[in-house]
Amino acid sequence: MKFGHFDDARKEYVINTPKTPYPWINYLGSEQFFGLVSNTGGGYCFYRDARLRRLTRYRYNNIPLDNGGRYYYIHDQGDYWTPGWMPVKRDLDFYECRHGLGYTSITGERNGLRVKQLQFVPLGFTGEVHQLTVSNVSNAPKEAKLFSFIEFCLWNANDDMTNFQRNLSTGEVEVKGSVIYHKTEYRERRDHYAFFSVNTDIDGFDTDRDSFLGAYNGLDTPAVVAEGNSGNSVASGWSPIASHGINISLQPGEEKTFVFVLGYVENPEEEKWESPGIINKTRAQAMIDQFTTDEGVNQAMAELASYWDGLLSKYTLKGPDDKLNRMVNIWNPYQCMVTFNMSRSASYFESGIGRGMGFRDSNQDLLGFVHQIPERARERIIDIASTQFEDGSAYHQYQPLTKKGNNEVGSGFNDDPLWLILGTAAYIKESGDYSILDEQVPFDSNPDNTATLFEHLKRSFFHVIHNLGPHGLPLIGRADWNDCLNLNCFSKEPGESFQTTANIEGRVAESVFIAGLFVFVGPDYVELCKRRGLHQEAEEAQAHIETMRKTTLEHGFDGDWFLRAYDHYGNKIGSKENEEGKIFIEPQGFCVMAGIGVEEGLAAKALKSVEEHLETDYGIILQTPPYSKYYLNLGEISSYPPGYKENAGIFCHNNPWVMIAETVLGNGDRAFELYRKIAPAYLEEISEIHRMEPYVYAQMIAGRDAVHHGEAKNSWLTGTAAWNYIAITQSILGIQADFDGLRIDPCIPKDWNGFSIVREFRGNTFSITISNPNGVSKGVASLTVDGKALEGHTIPVSGSGGSYQVEVVLG
């Protein structure tokens, strides 16, 4: 069942009912200011950090679902409603939500009034712009009243929800003209405030929540809206809000447009005050002045469209079907960019409070967007590396505002360091910029203790070698990629963190996954050593890689598939010897991606085992059989009910590892079959089962052992976005940046006749046509550039800024 449709020409997803199976959201902002907005107007916004600079309040896990946002109420002769349906939930004569690239428009109509609510964050702007167009589509004059509404958060989202003995006494606002200023805590240590303005004279306002709603009312029945008159309330303590009241007169066919700005301002310490107790509004006024007319809105929207067109033009596909084209050209790279901006910090499943930017997460995320804005990838790599410790380990997360490691989550996730090598190599392959390796980067964010980025990479590589277990496999530490496989935790205490608790210390538990990752990432480190003239170090590193390859085959293969790990007692995990959790997906994907067991035929056996034991109609589950009880030696993975999350759920993040592994063996049909199973555009017809947005990936889909098999959770912010983009663009379609140029090596379904791609790379534009006259999956028979034949698969690239015609024939 579908709840909308793709509008590919406008790069939008169009939702035609507010009653989607779950709120379907979009993201506003691409630089420093961000917002989340649902198809009914729910959500919130923040400056840089969703925990520490939250502008508007949002209550997660709320009842009714998705209750709270930026709302506009219409009072029409005693009848009141909202264009996004929520929170009033009056029936609408027409409803439409269009989620586009960095903007959302919601249109609602009732009793002859139509309201279009456009929301976006302009480029270079620290705030949201809301353009509200009110139209009289009836044949009679209309007298109506418009009420805006936002609820201010008191900056620190965690403190805002917990510290009521203080917070219910600190709320402060100012009102000047048509602008409401939120200045809670500005009197003391803060140098920032928020404001909410409209570009017209107002007929009233409210800044006190209880006065606007009525003490025991909800957002669905605000007293001010029901009565049709603003109360001109001024918040003092209690809960500050911002609401403008505007009287509207419209003749038949007439429309009026209003521009609201919800903004964030920082003032230098010496410029905080206009006069005693009165905030300096100069910067706010400058922001407001940009959007006094519709022309300002139109220009900013055009700039935003141009920005996204520029990003998405870096890789464009004309392929065999529309669903694939829209995923590759629009929605997957868009999600990659949003995920880069947010890491795992703020979605409808991540509150923005408990998690910041992930060390592992952000390195993986940049793989999916590095071709769009390499310079931002460079900046992110430096930020990530700055939280590394001298021994090569790292904080697992850091806060985006402070860029310092998050002590609450801690360190000791032993796969983390290797992702820094992968991310840095991806940046260099894309940009050709080796100078990043010479950047001086702090350890533990200490500017007095620095080393080159290359030295950080070296310590990442040798962190594995210095932390090997009894079998010569890497020690797992607190966890590896699977945060819920906690082999050193042994927690019996309810509520105790599986990720930060180690009740039994030991250097025994080993990870076969980290072994596969090490062999996969290691060659990039070796190549960087060579290019710096460090040939002896390169040879030493290569020897470690070969040893790990042999060790993995000797101690990490279980006959038909790769083991997952060894636990604290040295017992196998992910083995035929286990009653539950006999086979896991992660090592099958990464070990084969690394080429382990390919020559011996063991890689093919491992992938066949995935197909036989782990594959379902909705994707590949993480492990099987699921854990039916809590295992003290395994930790959080066994705490979930069967079929959910890491306990035999379909963890979409690691499905593309198997897709890529299949291309290593040349199985193009199989790789694309797996791709279609979890790509959201292919799931649109089963939205009532899938529930999440049909335009972006979810982290998890319930596995076959779950009550609701096929139901997704945790959409938007997931490494699934980057890895599926890599799987389709680099491994299946086969266009991959490499150190010496652009590598062309597709692995496609045999029945594809061909496809074409335009790829911008290091200042050049390559128009690539790939034909498949012989119906093969893999193998380049010929490669020509501007009619000149090339040997091999790689097009050497110079920064000439030229345009090149590339013809590739498979065979």
Image (cartoon, grey):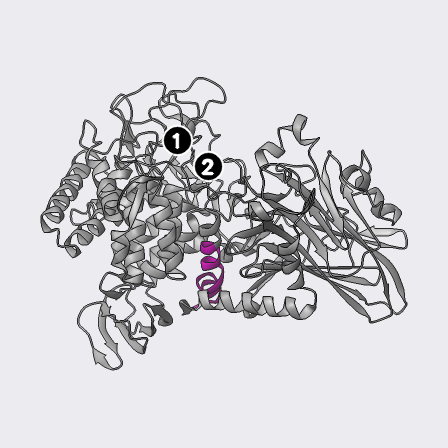
Q: Is residue 13 above or below residue 238?
A: below
Q: Which mark is residue 645?
A: 2
The residue range painted magenta reads 320-337
Q: Which of the two discs, 1 and 2, labels the residue nearer the N terminus?
A: 1
At x 58% / y 37%, what residue is drawn?
A: 189
> Residue 700 placed where, x, y %?
47, 42
Q: Quadrant of residue 347?
A: top right
Residue 410: assigned label: 1
Numbered label tally: 2
Q: State left or right for residue 658 relative to residue 191.
A: left
> Can residue 589 be seen in this snapshot?
no
Residue at (28, 51) in percent of width and height = 439
Q: Position of residue 163 (x, y in %)?
A: 63, 28
Residue 174 point in image, percent of width and height: 73, 45
Tell me which secondary structure the magenta stretch mostly adopts. helix
Give the amino acid at mark 1: Gly
Marking on residue 399: none
For the point 20% across and 45% down, the residue is 596
310 sits to left or right of 522: right
Q: Nearer the viewer, residue 806 or 579?
A: 806
Of 563 and 300, the residue lying toward us: 300
- Label 1 packing within 10 angstroms: few (<14), some (14-19), many (20+): some
Is 678 displayed left or right of 772 in the figure?
right
Q: Position of residue 365 (x, y in %)?
A: 40, 50
Compared to residue 343, the image places residue 144 above or below, namely below
